[in-house]
Amino acid sequence: MPELPEVETIARTLRGELGAPPLLGRQISSVHVLWAREVAHPEPDVFTQRAAGSTVTGIRRHGKYLLIELQAATPMVMAIHLKMSGRLDMVSAREAFTPHARVVWSLDDGSALRFEDARKFGRVWLLDRPSALLAPLGPDALTVEAEVFVQRLRSRRTRLKTLLLDQTFIAGVGNIYADEAAHRAGIHPCRKTASLTDSEVVRLHQAVQAVLCEGIAANGASFDWVYPGGHYQENFWVYGRAGQPCRKCGAPIMRTVLAQRSTYYCPTCQPLDR
C-alpha cells in the first residue's frame, strides 16, 4: 500500500515539480466512472456532473490522502485514497482506458488523469470541504510537532508498531516506514508505549520524520507495477531483510508478525527488554 512518501511523490508529480506535465492548472473536460464503487461520494452521476468543467487549483496531501482542489461555480476538493493497488497517472487520451482503469478525468489539453486500481479497494470523494473525511485522522506524520507527538503517544496504551500504524495517532505511516523508524530510533516494535522513556519518544519522533523525508527524497519505495519509479527499497535497513545482516551491527534481521503485519527488526539494536 502506498504510504506517505509515495503519495507525496504523486502530489509533487501532479504539481509538475518532478518534470512531468502538471495536472495543476488543467480544466477537467469530462469524467468517466468505469467502476461505480470506486466513487465513495457523491453518487457517480453527480460526481461526474460536478467535476466536469472544473479547474485544478491546488494539489496537497494529508497522511495517505491525496487532495485535489477544484474551482467551478464553488470550490470543491477531490480526495483520493489509493488503498492496496491504486495508481494515479497523467497519460495521453489514447492510454487512458486500460483494463484496470476505474476513473478517468479527460483534460482540456487532450491528456487524462487515470486512476487504475486492480483490486478495486481505492476510493474517490468529491466534497465541498474535506474536514469531515479527515477528522478521524491524526496530524500528518511529516509535520507533527514533537510536543504533539509526545502528548498523543502518552495517551495511548499499546505496542509501538501498532500505534505507528494507527492513522488516528498520526497519519501517513504504514508498514515499511514504521519498521524503518523503529529501527532508526533503536526501539523494538513490540515495546509497550508506556515503557518508553521521554528521550526514546523524542528519538522516535525524529526517526519517523527522518525516514519519511528519506523516502520522499527517493520518490518512495517500489516493489511492483503498482507504484513504479521509487528507490527507497534500495536503502531499507530492516524491512523485508529477514536473515540478512543488520547494516549497523551485523546481527541477522528478525521477522515477526505484529498487528497482522510482517514486522522486521534487529534484536541487537532493538532489544525488547530495554
Image (cartoon, rainbow, N blue to C red):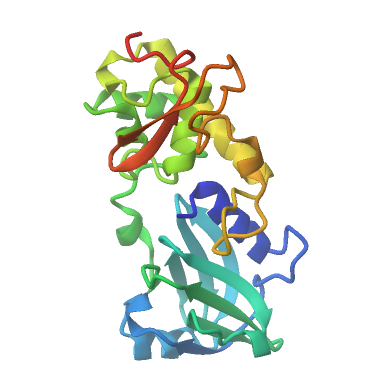
Res 144 visible: no
Query: Vertical placement of 261 versus 13: above or below?
Result: above
Instruction: Name the image quarter holding the C terminus.
Output: top left
**Residue 162 sits in which quadrant?**
top left
Query: Which residue corresponds to the image point at 66% horizontal and 40% vertical from the top-left?
Result: 234
Query: With 256 as the anchor, is 10 left or right in this view?
Result: right
Marks counted in the figure total 0
Residue at point 65%, 85% (across, down): 95
- Please name the residue shown 62% across and 54% down the image: 9
Residue 96, placed above or below residue 180: below
Q: Quadrant of residue 131?
A: bottom left
User: Quick one: 268 or 123, which is closer to the camera?
Assistant: 268
Residue 70 lies, in percent from the top left, at 52, 74
| Residue nearest the observer in this picture, 259 or 71 | 259
Residue 211 image position (x, y, % from top left)? 57, 34
40, 135: nearer the viewer: 40
Residue sitting farthest toward the top:
274
Residue at 53% over, 34% down: 241
* Outermost residue to the front: 243
> For the N terminus, which image quadrant?
bottom left
Q: Position of residue 271 (x, y in %)?
A: 40, 13
